[in-house]
Image (spheres, helix red, strand yellow):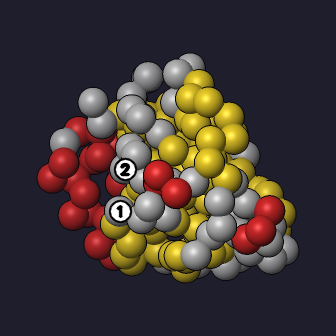
Amino acid sequence: MIHDRFSFLTRLEGLGPRWQAATQFLAQPNLADLPDGRTDLILGEVWAVVMRRSGREANAAQFEVHRRFADIQCCVVGREQLGWSAAPDSLRIAQPFDAEKDVEMRHGPVTEFLPLSPGWFAVLFPGEPHAPLIGEGLLTKIVIKVLVE
């Protein structure tokens, strides 16, 4: 897991062209004004999803775990507390792994939080459980999926 400021996004570019595509997308001005939906950056390998969702309480959050894709999570409007777990084996499987969506859903208490507000990002690698959208009010998020296999 990586948690840092946008000013350090370019450090990810050394990981290869997929990461370069992601950081270039996030370098554009006015991210908060982008329309909701998916934008393919490298077909089948890297895409961005812009969404506006209401924040939820930590006890209503579910953990996601991916196997093939890393997430770059950014909250560009509002303040999100991204739930995270260093102990994936302590979480119960809520929905088995769906290979098409590259996600398994898990239940368990959220005990660790990463603050995400405008200007910050988090990278969650495959196998790292995370519970997004914990916060209050309307949040505008960008999640970039990056193939890591």
Judge whether residue 1 can be spotted in this image: yes
Q: Which label's residue is closer to the chain start, 2 or 1? A: 1
Residue 21's place in the image compared with 108, above or below, is above
Figure quadrant of residue 82: bottom right
Q: How far apart are labels 2 and 1 at the CA level? A: 6 Å
Name the residue at 38% across, 44% down. 126
- Number of other residues with Cα within 10 Å of mark 1, as a class: few under 14, some 14 to 19, many 20 or more: few
- Can you give x and y, in whole percent of width and height, for residue 48 in the image? 53, 43
Q: Amino acid at mark 1?
A: Met
Residue 59: quadrant of the picture: bottom right
**Circle 2/circle 1 CB separation < 8 Å:** yes
Residue 117 % position (x, y): 58, 78
Look at 49% across and 64% down and name the residue there.
Answer: 85
**What residue does disc 2 label?**
125
Name the foreground residue: 66 vs 26: 66
Q: Give left or right: position of 139 versus 45.
A: right
Residue position for label 1: 1
Residue in the foreground of this view, choosing between 94 and 45: 94
Q: Nearer the viewer, residue 104 or 48?
A: 104
**Mark 2 secondary-structure assignment:** loop
Q: Residue at x 15, y 52 (%)?
A: 14
Locate the N terminus by quadrant.
bottom left
The location of residue 107, given as percent across then percent down, is: 67, 53
Question: Within 10 angstroms of label 2, few (less than 14), some, or many (20 or more) residues?
Answer: many
Can the viewer see residue 27 in this picture? no
